[in-house]
Amino acid sequence: MLAALRYLGGACGRAGGDFPAPCGPARLRPWLLRGGCCYGRSASTSSFDVVIVGGGIVGLASARALIQRHSALSIGLLEKEKDLALHQTGHNSGVIHSGIYYKPASLKAKLCVQGAALIYEYCNKKGISYKQCGKLIVAVEQEEIPRLQALYERGLQNGVQGLRLIQKEDIKKKEPYCRGLMAIDCPHTGIVDYRQVALSFAQDFQDAGGSVLTNFEVKDIEMAKESPSGSQDGMKYPIVIRNTKGEEVRCQYVVTCAGLYSDRISEMSGCSPDPRIVPFRGDYLLLKPEKCYLVKGNIYPVPDSRFPFLGVHFTPRMDGNIWLGPNAILAFKREGYKPFDFSARDVMDVIVNSGLVKLVLENFSYGVNEMYKACFLSATVKHLQKFIPEITVRDILRGPAGVRAQALDRDGNLVEDFVFDGGVGDIGSHILHVRNAPSPAATSSLAISGMIADEVQQRFEL
């Protein structure tokens, strides 16, 4: 398993819609829904064997996996918000990806195929609703067909089940209003409410004895300088994690799953901040309810391999809505879900410390086109009409948005695969950072958690 993890030279370091469904498991304990500490723990005095930083779906899945394997250990999870899974987990498209897109032998490919199967199994076990509605990746122009065929071959290499190339007449059978020359039929693609899944992970973790501390925004991670009040805690729990309110948690080992803040959390612990996280906002449109009959399953374009984004597509939702999009434009705030959300620190961070300028220069026309589509609905509709000509501007509404944590190195290269990394020195030997967990991290969350649990067990000799 160690050989499967990617490291960055011994130094320590991606996922949008609003309307996150408020539904979690009905038996979820009330404190979790309103925020707070379970079992009456005070953050200023809590000590754990292992602490997970980050209450998104990857962090929760990892906490669940660790406590199920190591029931004798005290394990805590820290989340800066009052509730769990509010950001990338609560602002994504809800697609259970099949694993067709990713480079063969990459962690993305391996973990997505494994993770999709595990998500379906988990939802069946827990009674969580999902729909295995399938997906068509559709070529609408002759020049897209070679790319489509190459993508099909990639999917076969990745072990994606049920793939087949279909022609015009079969496209019409599956999607009566969709036009195309050729398509890949991905029958194992599905949809689910990932926040509901994440809250179920939290319930499993809590039921097994785990503790969740919400409203705990990490400000500092360091080695304990001395034992507090003459106790042995400084020796048994050498890592001190402080929040913005001055409270602290002590522990032996730390696993960080911080998403949009993974670079900053790594830097706090004395590890390298690179690669930097650059936030990209994805704006969705909504198909009006009376027009939702036009779409049955997921309809995607043939992706352009030069970019990490899959292009504007049609996504059915568990609530019956159809999302159209998203675009991909630079967000001026890491949690900036609205067009005018702005953070001076976040903007300066990506300009000064990342390779964003080089990326923008190399992809200037693409960026301008994405911004144009964000401003003018007609531009997005024109693209959608390539697939379903019946859609007009009158049939759509502006909808939700999400922010993707895109890892970028200083040379302006997109970091494509999952990255897990440890630290250096005394503190580094006690920390494992999940530095880059882009889409399909939600689909892959259970598979990722197994890999993290394996690595934690080996690295920390649990």
Image: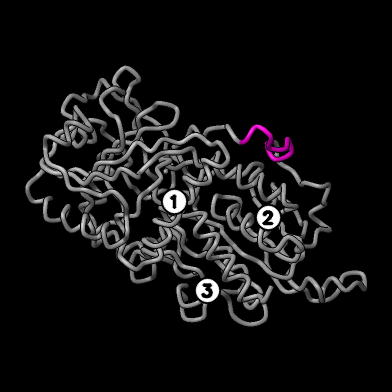
Q: Quadrant of residue 94?
A: top left
Q: Nearer the viewer, residue 146 or 173?
A: 173
**Residue 155 occupies which quadrant of the picture?**
bottom left
> Looking at the picture, which amino acid does disc 2 mark?
Leu
Q: How far apart are marks 3 and 2 (CA)?
A: 23 Å
Give the answer, above or below, for where 168 lies relative to 267.
Answer: above
Q: Distance between the residues labelled 1 and 3?
A: 34 Å
Q: Nearer the viewer, mark 3 or mark 2?
A: 2
Q: Residue 117 carries which label?
A: 1
Residue 94 visible in the shown view: yes
Which residue position holds label 2?
77
Q: Is residue 114 left or right of residue 152?
A: right
Picture residue at 18% right of the left edge, 58% below the top? 150
* Crowd around label 2: few <14 · some 14–19 · many ≥20 (10 Å): many
Q: Which of marks 1 and 2 is nearer the N terminus?
A: 2
> 414 above or below 346?
below
Mark 1 or mark 3, which has the lower sequence index? 1
Q: Where is residue 278 in the image (x, y as percent from the top left)?
A: 42, 57
Under circle 2, the secondary element is strand
Which quarter of the figure has residue 316?
top left
Extent of the magenta region: 25-33
Q: In this view, does 358 lie above or below 458?
A: above
- Could you tell me which secondary element the residue under label 3 belongs to? loop
- Counting from the top left corner in percent of width and height, residue 297 is at 31, 34
